[in-house]
Amino acid sequence: MSMKKRWFALFTVPLFFVFIVVVIIPFLSGVYYSFVSWDGLPKNPMKFVGFANYAKAFADTRFLNSLERTTVFTLITMVTVNVLALGFALVVTSKLRLRNVGRVMIFMPYLIGGLLLGYIWQFILGDCMATLGEMTGRTDLFFYWLSNKQFAFIGLIVVATWQMAGYMMVIYIAGLQSISDDVMEAANVDGASYWQALFRIRLPLLMPSITICLFLTLSNCFKIYDVNLALTGGGPANATEMVSMNIFNEIFAKSNYGYGQAKAIVFFIIVGVITMFQVRLTSRREVEV
Amino acid sequence: MKRMKTLTCIVLALSLLLGLGLAGAQAESAGKIVVFQQKTEIYDQLVELAKTYQEETGVEVEVWPIAGDDYYQNLKTYMASESGPTVFTLNSASEIAEMSGYLADLSDLDVMGKVQENLIAMVDGKKTGVPMTAEGFGIIYNKDLVDPEAISTMDGLIAYIQEQKAAGLTGLGLSQEGYFLIGQILNFPFAVQDDPVAFCQQVFSGEVKLADVPEFQEFAKLFVAIRENQVNPLEVTYDGNCGDFATGKTAAIHQGNWCYTMFSTYDIDFEMGMVGLPVGGSTAIAVGIPSYWFVNADASEEEQQLGKDFLDWLYTSETGVDYLMNKFGFLPVVDGMTSEKLDPISASVADAIASGNIIDWTFNTEWPASVIMNDLVPVAEEFFTTEMTEADFLTALNDAFVTAAAE
């Protein structure tokens, strides 16, 4: 090994060490725990049960329902977040006078933690909506959203979109700014309209950003927990219980540590496969000038 | 120059390690205990008590904050990561059984000699849990607005709820949190049975169907009346529920004497009382030991001793007892402990205890672990957001118990 390579290795050691300690080891022990029946308390007995936990997971309707619900949630939120983020990015990179203020305001929700955000919106979608309904008389739209199954779910989408759109916008802004002015100018000279330039030139050149944003929204939406917990807590009647919350409840509320771990591994594989597939698909469409 | 670079790297690497070492060392300072308990309503007072304790004994007491219903989940997480509190509380028999490996033997505590045997939490014949207080729950009513005689039968109660609706008031306030939505109120039809313990077992094993039991049919009728005549309980918080009662917007709520700590922050100009939920011809208040204090057997010997000293001080010293009686509003459970100024609700509970007109807390002693939060709450939420019939409601509750008991 050359001197340079050794230095390189030395500098990656801390990161490598951290990665092994906080990701690899917990993951492997998680795989191990998924084969036992245990309540999670070190002093209580642990029993090896083989694949029984996995078999149970695939027969657990509450788990399967939450998996389906999370998939629907992810698909919708992925679209709303990215369309909004791209729209905002286009607006705030234009010659608009308020573009800097706009950037700050749209990015701000991302800086507020998911829990806090959830509680703020719990107030808005709950008491505020109900009060608005009383004031305006439009009780068909303005009512206590969180005690209605469908509307609580919509509320979750609204809040998650509001939280993530700002962050994705920043990535799109960076992507848009990296498109060279020459290309845009050439398009202008050739007489391309705004929409032609957008769809034929900017979007194709933006594909790397789109890949990243889709990946981030996809994995974040699948794994959503904090907003879910603070906004609806899974209710009413488990109608908004996402997979992460289902797993958490299995482990910490029902004390089925091993079973919960098995669900987590199943969940990991699903998220892993889907995101890998998505990254392959979108990165194939990336082009260079 | 090259040497300089190497040196810098080594120094940086070392400082990283040193940082880790220091962080580890700071966690262990002497003379400190951590207290973690579920009762949100005494949290502020407990923090104040911790300061007093430190002034008196020099031992630092850190009180960890809590978020109500999630207490047990949080506690378990701390315990599993071996960073649990020194002194903590547990509520139900199922929790105590699960945590039994972590409960230190407290037989040598002074306070244990002064408490009735049947109030102490025992594990394998050892005294491990100090009863926190006794509590009672039932219908807390505003004496200006409600005649207790009128609501002493289920039909009367339902008629009263309908009357209140006509007057624009909430008849019997419930709130969205699991215990206050369904957990505690559902105790009544269980506890009024002739032999509640045997009855619970029959229900959990599927022998008895709740839909066939008259007390439960009455209960389901009440819930329908609540759904039809009141604001959806899922839209009401504990604070809102108690606050509305304190300000006269709600004539009666289903709550316990613990909420008086909250009432006392309002200027209340009416008298209040408590009666049990009228099912099966009984109006007894449900009285039980809500929680027990435990010392973490996983903590170091010294820390355990500090924890034991703290509990002894809390229940036997003058300052400690003063806090328990006057600041926490606890009912006396230790012999020789008396409270001169019980709040009106606690006084109702104390009277009921004295007269023996009380029923047990089966949800603490008999019900399967975490059945309330995991299985009953979704059923109640479903009930309050749909047109679920009485029979379906009882069947769903029945299934919830059977599933939870089988797990």
Image (cartoon, rainbow, N blue to C red):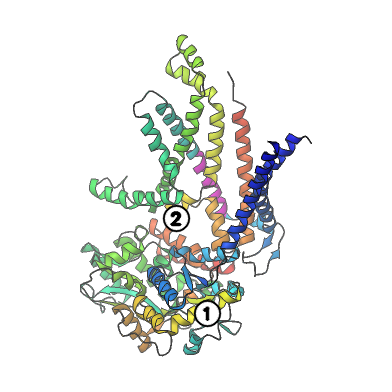
Q: Splitting the image into 4 quarters, where does residue A275 fall? A: top right
Alpha carbon distance from label 2 to label 1: 40 Å
Residue B400: assigned label: none
Q: Secondary structure at mark 1?
A: helix
In magenta stretch: residue B18: no
Tell me residue A215's x, y (percent): 56, 37
Q: Residue furthest right?
A: A1
Residue B308: mark in rendering: 1
Kindly identify which chain the residue marked by label 2 belongs to: A
Q: Tag 1: residue type?
A: Lys
**Location of mark 2 (residue):** A235
Q: Where does residue B162 sit, x and y in percent of width and height?
A: 26, 66
The residue range painted magenta reads A61-76
Residue A57 appears in view: no
Q: Quadrant of the N terminus of chain B?
A: top right
Q: Quadrant of residue B186?
A: bottom left
Q: Quadrant of the C terminus of chain B?
A: bottom right
Disc tally is 2
Q: Is residue B310 visible?
A: yes
